[in-house]
Image (spheres, grey):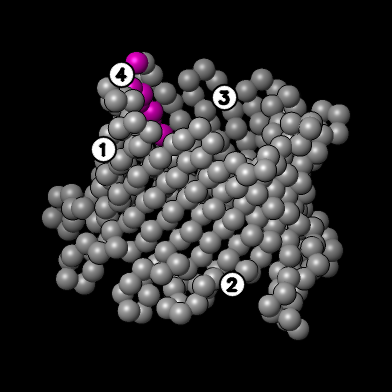
Amino acid sequence: MWTWCLLLVLCLPLVGQQTTTTYTTDLNGSTVPGASYSTLRSGNTTTTTETTQNVNGRQTPLLSTTDRVIKDDSGGRVVERITKRFDANGHLTETEKQQIDEKKNADGSVSSTATTYRSDINGNFQLAERVVTDASKSGNTTNSSITVERPTVNGSLDVVEKKVRVEDDEKNASKSDETVYRKDQDGRFVESLRVVKDTSEQNGQQVVNTAQYEPSDSGRMKIASQTVARIRKNPDGTESQEVDIYRNVPGRAETNATPALRERQIIEQRKVGDKVIETTSVQRPTISDPNRLGAPRQISERVCVGKNCK
């Protein structure tokens, strides 16, 4: 049996504030409140808080993230991010501090360094990760080299992951090709993941084709999953989408098989007065005919009230 969800988003028409509330329908048909997300913007600071209802029916925090823009000028941008995590009773369990330094290069690209510190059991902050992005641009092509560093047992930073990203932007099309390298058992960096994303305009609609490649049993990279989204603009300014999801066996790229169509999502938006209502329906293969999608079933609804709804 499926557990169907009803998602209601209430974008309160208050200056700088937006609230999202999720409701789920259990197997008995009862509506159960889920997580709520509240975003408050004030000056150069934005705070997003996720709360949920505990067993006593009280709202308790789960996650809180505060972004504060320290610097934003022609030379670059510096953002301080504070993330707090809480347990089921709303008690603070961990605090994470991150500083993101972005530098605007002369060629129009942006290089960055993101340094993350996490609190230990005594509340002291320890260096947890550093992500360095070096970018360069030539014409419509941006090349980025990304390294992920984490502390070793002796406290020094060691590169644990490398990424190479190439982005091409044209007038009516764009392409992003990112390859991830991770260490194997011998400490050598090997290709572990590749994601290729093509965006184009076709017949008045935007088509986004995203393919993910993973190592096969032979070690060669083979396609493991693919998502094709067709997006069109409605006359009232809203959007409608049809998303086809193709997948192989999770976590494994089959050598002699292309991903099969596992799900189709139909996302429709419409305006009703000052509201934007978004419904999501899915089609999945039936047990009796696994090679054919069944009838669409609505699984969620999103209702946004306010001037900035989209």
- Nearer mark to the viewer, of 4 and 2: 2
Crowd tier of the residue under label 1, counting other residues whose Cα lies within 10 Å: few below 14, some 14–19, many 20 or above: some
Residue under label 3, please give it.
41
Label 3 to label 2, Cα distance in Å? 43 Å
Label 4 to label 1, Cα distance in Å? 15 Å
Residue under label 4, please give it.
75
Q: Decide whether the magenta segment is chiefly helix, strand or loop.
A: strand
Asked if residue 40 is positioned above or below residue 125 in the image, the reply reads: above
Q: Earlier in the sequence, mark 3 or mark 1?
A: 3
Crowd tier of the residue under label 4, counting other residues whose Cα lies within 10 Å: few below 14, some 14–19, many 20 or above: few
Type of amino acid at the residue the image marks with label 3: Arg
Q: Considering depth in this image, is 255 or 41 the residue closer to the camera?
A: 255
Label 3 to label 4, Cα distance in Å? 24 Å
Type of amino acid at the residue the image marks with label 1: Asp
Label 4 to label 2, Cα distance in Å? 47 Å
Residue 59 rendering spot, x and y as whole percentages = 66, 45
Residue under label 1, please give it.
134
Crowd tier of the residue under label 3, counting other residues whose Cα lies within 10 Å: few below 14, some 14–19, many 20 or above: some
- Residue 169, can we see it? yes
Q: Earlier in the sequence, mark 4 or mark 2?
A: 4
Label 1 to label 2, Cα distance in Å? 37 Å
- Asked where in the image residue 240 lies, by quadrant, the reply is top right
